[in-house]
Image (cartoon, rainbow, N blue to C red):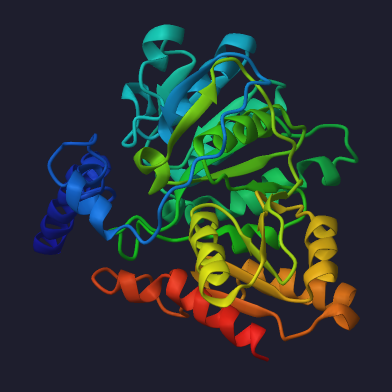
Amino acid sequence: MAAVASRTAGLLRLRAAGAERRWCGPRCAGLVQGFLPPGGEGAAQKRRVAHFTFQPDPESLQYGQTQKMNLFQSITSALDNSLAKDPTAVIFGEDVAFGGVFRCTVGLRDKYGKDRVFNTPLCEQGIVGFGIGIAVTGATAIAEIQFADYIFPAFDQIVNEAAKYRYRSGDLFNCGSLTIRAPWGCVGHGALYHSQSPEAFFAHCPGIKVVIPRSPFQAKGLLLSCIEDKNPCIFFEPKILYRAAVEQVPVEPYKIPLSQAEVIQEGSDVTLVAWGTQVHVIREVASMAREKLGVSCEIIDLRTIVPWDVDTVCKSVVKTGRLLISHEAPLTGGFASEISSTVQEECFLNLEAPISRVCGYDTPFPHIFEPFYIPDKWKCYDALRKMINY
């Protein structure tokens, strides 16, 4: 027994030592390398293997002075605006005090103090539970889960506590001032535990909102809307865009309404729906369809997954008669299924072809086979061509 106890104690010590290094070990080994600034080692290779080309939106001047930002800088700007405006706002999570593994909170602890920007233990359930408690007191809680892949230990806190707090109390109390941020989606080399897109898990849960931006401008406006919304929100950030996406972003705070999809490009023959990184993929597909097939595509960025904008999507499908939905998450049970079902019910007599879903495979997210797994422009284009020829 003594030998067993000694062996167990040794294993626990090794596990504890490993846990202390998790932020730069199994959780993000290789990922931080892939996010070095342009010109850094590995940056050129990262750009070569990208399966999309980021297309910035035209500069918006309606919110005042703009500044060139990438996506992680726009997140930092939004968090800075929130902390400056709301003295009750706090930011917490694994390693956020020194800027986080993706540098989204860099400089905020020095500016606002260690009582408002601070680290937590490596315990996602505890991070969200702590955030719920802060939000219930009326303060603004901004929690970071280091990767969306690691949000599942907090699933019970999100689904059974945060989402139901207002309902179960008859609106006597709530945790509506809770926002949960998490890096999301494929990255080129993330493999099983750094590439997942878990939005569909939370889309099945009434009481929370799920938001995914496509660009720095969208990210800042949508994140500020989530932080000020009166419901708990999950804000997934496409981590492959942290440095790949650069555009002009207003310096001052501004909000983009939740649950409103955006028609990025109007068209007459096919409706293409996506969110996050995949929006840039279907933009390329639309260009290919116009050049090769003479097909006019309407592109919609859903932006808010729940509650999603049914009216905008259905109005487009009534016009075009065809719908293609694409996301990185696996096909079965993905949110494309919900969109497809709703459109089939609402627009059945307007459909000229079966609705097409171009998604990830029903397998764990691979490492070296990621280029074969992701729903790239060629898969989407092939599905679009089949719809046109139906």
Of 49 and 385, which appears nearest the observer?
385
- Can residue 31 be spotted in the picture? yes
From the viewer's side, name the closer residue of 53 and 25.
53
The x, y position of residue 221, in whole percent, is: 63, 31
Is residue 206 shown left or right of residue 85? right
Image height check: is 310 above or below 263? Answer: below
> Which quadrant would residue 65 be assigned to in this image?
top right
Where is residue 314? Give x, y as percent: 83, 65
Would you say residue 75 is visible in this rendering?
A: no
Residue 352 appears in which quarter of the rendering? Answer: bottom right
Q: Nearer the viewer, residue 315 or 112?
A: 315
Could you say which is closer to the camera, residue 361 or residue 287? 287
Residue displayed at 62% across by 18% down: 253
Q: Position of residue 287 (x, y in %)?
A: 53, 63
Q: Position of residue 257 (x, y in %)?
A: 75, 36
Q: Quadrant of residue 283?
A: bottom right
User: Which part of the image, by quadrant, shows the N terminus?
Assistant: bottom left
